[in-house]
Image (spheres, coloured by chain):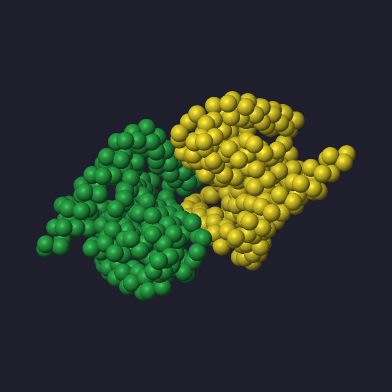
Chain colours: A yellow, B green
Amino acid sequence: MNRIAQQSNFYSKVIRFKFIKALQWRTEMILWILLDIFPFIILLFIWQSVLSLSASPSISLPELTVFYYLVILVQGFTVTHFEEYRPEEIRMGKIDFFLIKPYSFIQEIILNDIAGKLLYILMISPFLALLGYILWHLGLFAIPALTTIHVLVFVCLLLLAYILQFCLSLLITMTAFWFEEAQGLSNLKILVISLFSGTLIPFALLPEWLQKVTNAQPLKFLFAVPIRLIQEQALPTAQDWSMLFGTLAFLIGTIFLLWQRGIQKYSSAGG
Amino acid sequence: MQAFKKYWKIFWRFRKLELMRMMEYRGDFLFWALVSILWTGFNFFFFSLILRVSDTVAGWTADEMYLLLGTFTLLDAFTWTFFYQNMQRYTRHVFTGSLTMLLTKPISTIFLLTTSSNSFNNIFRFLIGCAAIVISLHRMEITPSISSVVLYFFALMAAALFIYAIWFMASTLSFWIEKLDNINEIIPGLRRVMQVPRGVFAGAASVLFTVLLPISLVASVPSEILLQKAETKWVVWLFVSSFLSLLLARKFFYFAIKRYSSVGN
């Protein structure tokens, strides 16, 4: 028990330190937030022009607004990007330090990302609240009627979506032990997620084949499932939960296997 | 004329060096070329999804939209080829203080900053853009006149110069803002505005994106020229705004450089 308390104390101290360190990039973070929100506003203009010329639109503008708002919210709370720079550390032989300390490279990535994510959530929340208020004021935003269960499941799904995103990023990072273009895989990750996780347009508007593909694989938990939970009050089925936990277990197992193999292969100048 | 020759020669020398670098990392080139092709395909696919909901976007039919996207793809491929790396290096030079080295060269600093690097990864995107334009025109049974094609290319050049100027100005802000590595993401972040017809924007947004910061004209106006529905005032404004923004970017750089300092200066 004492050991658990000690470990928790240690982790919270590291997260606090990383949080303070991340604060020095606050201006950059605000710019990222604005760059995340801006395309959403442009999409609203596009959809407005599309729907205004459509004789019998299959969806209303407020529904679309809520959908894209939820995309930004889920994205802000769950997306990870460390695979854009961490592989470089492995390739350049900069992880020696973690191999000789009782604090592994994976722990470093986890704690650093949690601190960064906490700061990002703190910073994006006022922007989201303001945006929601403006959209509500314009009559474009209707808050869906949700039960406590829906809210709790939504929060739970956000947390699991974050872990799933994190595992995918870590998996890409681990490939840097063998693959020179690991950073480039980050681009492919974003592309595949954008295509198959339900971020493009509301699920009902997707072509049938894409609906089937989205439904058949676990990337749907990143966006489609949490968003449908809010918009359609569709709770995930038992099959969905088993798919999600099965995927997470598989990814975590693969990551540790790759890590074990990777550090055996790892070499650096003087390392 | 002598100076122009000198700069022309240096420009192509840089391209040769970059080509040699690319040949050194052929796998890298192929990988990133594949990524850029996939993103282009994704972009077309996204708009095809929107066009499933309605036949038109701001009055533009599907074929007209694909022509617009083709034009945007050309511009985007060009800007990523020539601007992105250079602007990144530019801001890095300012942040690290290594700009001093460039300031002492017997050559225009702006030229050196914005032409020394490029990437070849977007060549295939460029070709996809061309193909989209040709196919769309063929499907609409439009045969543009030679004068339209010439004007289209001039409008594209003006659009590229406009993007260059505003990107350069955004990067020049790095003289005032420290630790802002994503400053070069501002202009790429506006790309969604360039991909849609200017008619999409109404009210204040229309004034902002077509008059004050006319980024919604950069792909729209050249496409309208090919579709023979361009309005003279917007064509003129695209050229004028490009010219003005270039002047402004240059003035802004020389104003900003006054506050530059680095260790040893």
Q: For this rendering, which residue is in front, B188 or B154?
A: B188
Residue drawn where x is 46% and y is 66% of the image: B205
Check the image and report above or below for A22 versus A177: below
Residue drawn where x is 23% and y is 62% of the image: B107
Residue A221 lies, in percent from the top left, at: 65, 38
Image quarter hosting the C terminus of chain B: bottom left
Q: For this rendering, which residue is in front, A241 or A101?
A: A101
Residue A125 lies, in percent from the top left, at: 67, 59
Identity of the residue furthest to the front in this view: A270
Residue drawn where x is 29% and y is 36% of the image: B23
Image quarter hosting the N terminus of chain B: bottom left
Residue A38 lies, in percent from the top left, at: 52, 58
Identity of the residue furthest to the right in this view: A1
Check the image and report above or below for B14 versus B154: above
Q: For this rendering, which residue is in front, B200 or B262?
A: B262
Image-quadrant location for residue B133: top left
Residue A263 lies, in percent from the top left, at: 58, 29
- Quick check: can you spot residue A142? no
